[in-house]
Every structure is written in C-alpha cells, then in structure tokens.
Image: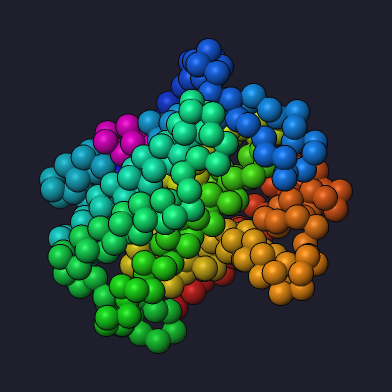
Amino acid sequence: MTQELISLLASAMSFAITAALGKKVIPWLHKLKYGQTIKEIGPKWHEKKQGTPTMGGIMFIAGILISLIVCLPLYYYLRSGGSIASSYEDTKSYWVRLIAGVLMAVMFAAVGFLDDYIKVVKKQNDGLTPGQKMIFMTLISGAFLATLAISGDATVTTIPFFSSEVDVGFWFYPVSLIMIVGFVNAVNLTDGIDGLCSSVTFFVAIVFIVIAGMHSMFGMSIFAAAVAGGCLGFLVWNFFPAKVFMGDTGSLFLGGLFCALAYGVNMPILIPLVGIIYLCEAGSVMLQVAYFKATHGKRIFKMSPIHHHFEMSGWSEVKIVWVFSIVTLIAGVIAVALSIA
C-alpha cells in the first residue's frame, strides 16, 4: 500500500506544481512576447490563436521533475528499510532504465526549447531544420540505448504470448533507435490542437501506471504517475480554448517520457499499441506526402496530421480530443491485457 500512496503523492505534487505555475509562467511568457506564430498552411480558424504563449511545456517539466526528485528517493528509502519489497527492482539495469529515461526526456526537451527559442525569439518560424532535429534526436536516442547496453541485459525484452523474456540480439538497437526517434516526432505532431497531446499522454501514462504496478515495478509506476499529474495540471491551462501551448519544449519532452516508460517496464513492443494515436498522426503525414508526390498533387486527407483532417470535416477540437483519448484508453486496456499474458 505504501507504494500506491507514493504514486498518488507524485501525481498530486506534479499536478499542483504544474497548475500553480500557470499563474506565473503564462503572464511571464506574455510579457516576453513568446507567442505562437500560426503557420499559413494550417486551418484558417487557427489564426485567432496567433500570439498565444508557447513554451508552456516548462510548466509540466518542472512539475514532473520536482515530483520525481522528491518521491523516488522517498520510495527508495522505504524500500531499503524493508517497507517495500520487489526483487526485480534490485537489479542495476532497472534503475538505469528509469534514470536514463528521465535524462533522455530532458535532453529532448532541450532540443525542443532550442527550436522554440529560434521560432519565438529569433522570429524564424521554421525553427531548427528537419536535418538538425534528426541529428540531435538520433544522438540522444543513441546515448540512451548505449547506456542500456552498458548496464547489461539491454536486448532482453518482454514479448507477450512468446515467453516472459526474449533476447532479440543486435536488432534491438537499430529498431529501438528508429522507434524512439519516430515516436518522439509523432508525439510532437500530435500537439496540433488545444489539449490533444496532453490529454492523450495523460491516458498513456495511466496505462503505464497499471502495467508497472502489475509487474511490481513501483518506481516506474511513480514515474508514470508524475507524468499523468503533470499532463492533467497542464490541461488546466491548455484545454480548449488554450491559454498556453506546450511548444516543442513540452511535446518532445513528453515523447521522450513515453519511450522511457515503455523501455522502463521492459515492453517496448507495446509502443505502437499504447501510442496508437501518435502512430496515426505520424502515419497520416507520411501517407499524405507520399501520395501527394506519387499522384502529382492529389491528397488522401483534407489536411495532415490527421487531427486537422477531422477539423476540416467539421469536428470541434474538443470532440477530437475526447475521441482520440478514448481510442488511446481502449488501446491501453488491450496493452494491459497483453502485458499479463
């Protein structure tokens, strides 16, 4: 029961800090004129969002990190005192996965901050070039995987229905590199309408709270609880109509956290399922671009990423957020069921 209380504390603390920071950070961003520039290629009605403060992701980054700094040492102290027992958590690789995962997310946030800074301070609306982003993200992902390799047993992963653990060998590394970079980008693409990315990621975090708890990975459960609390605290200010956007600072951080949680519970194979919305968002962009080039100007979707297609079809932003969140929840329930097998 102790670990559940610490998870609740982590979630509540992350929520409270993130929500409270909005009262200070949003006026500060307004004062600095760190407003979002709406691209002309987006839906025309998004033009009214011009000037809404961005880089608000620093709010939940602070909330989540402070919560983890307080709650994880508390949990570890209680474990060492015998109040909590978990044999798996006694392995070095477990704690390396957790700490390296958090650091990876922070590094992705730094890339996002640099991108946002170029956009809103230097007034260069495109920010970092795709090539620059790809180099940074590949290096960060590679460093994370190298850390796992050094800690040992990196290539041993849990695959439902085959066996409890399978050593996938060398292919673990290139596949993981592609998956991490791809899904961090996909989370970034999901941040396109008010409340969408933070809502979807909230339910993703809930799924990992359950999976980690069922497998007695209580440190990971606390980690996921902090993420859930931070997303919920940000929604206080980001739900339609948004008073602040998370920017790439926040979305890349959440993308890093998503991957860190999946690798933390040693089930990266569940990433495409739990992140089904992220996958659809990125997939819609790739399909749109490929089809547009192949057909010399024709389109599959009215606009991509796919949330814009639904907007152009008459769906409200709130409806899109609810439907995408429900889809994430359904996929999460399936993932939980698979993780038991």
Quadrant of the rendered image containing residue 154? bottom left
Q: Whole-percent x and y of residue 273?
A: 54, 68
Q: Is residue 10 left or right of residue 143?
A: right
The outermost residue toward the right is 314
- Name above or below for residue 11 compared with residue 277: above
Q: Whole-percent x and y of residue 141?
A: 33, 59
Q: Whole-percent x and y of residue 204?
A: 52, 54
Specify whether residue 31 is in view: yes
Front in this rendered view, residue 70 or 294? 294
Q: Whole-percent x and y of residue 13?
A: 40, 31
Magenta range is 64-71
Front in this rendered view, residue 302 or 242? 302
Identity of the residue drawn at 31% across and 73% down: 173
Is 271 one of the magenta-colored residues? no
Is 70 one of the magenta-colored residues? yes
Q: Quadrant of the C terminus?
A: bottom left
Q: Is residue 36 left or right of residue 308?
A: left
Identity of the residue drawn at 35% across and 52% down: 136
Identity of the residue drawn at 48% across and 60% down: 183
Quadrant of the rendered image containing residue 94? bottom left
Q: Is residue 149 left or right of residue 307?
A: left
Quadrant of the rendered image containing residue 334? bottom right
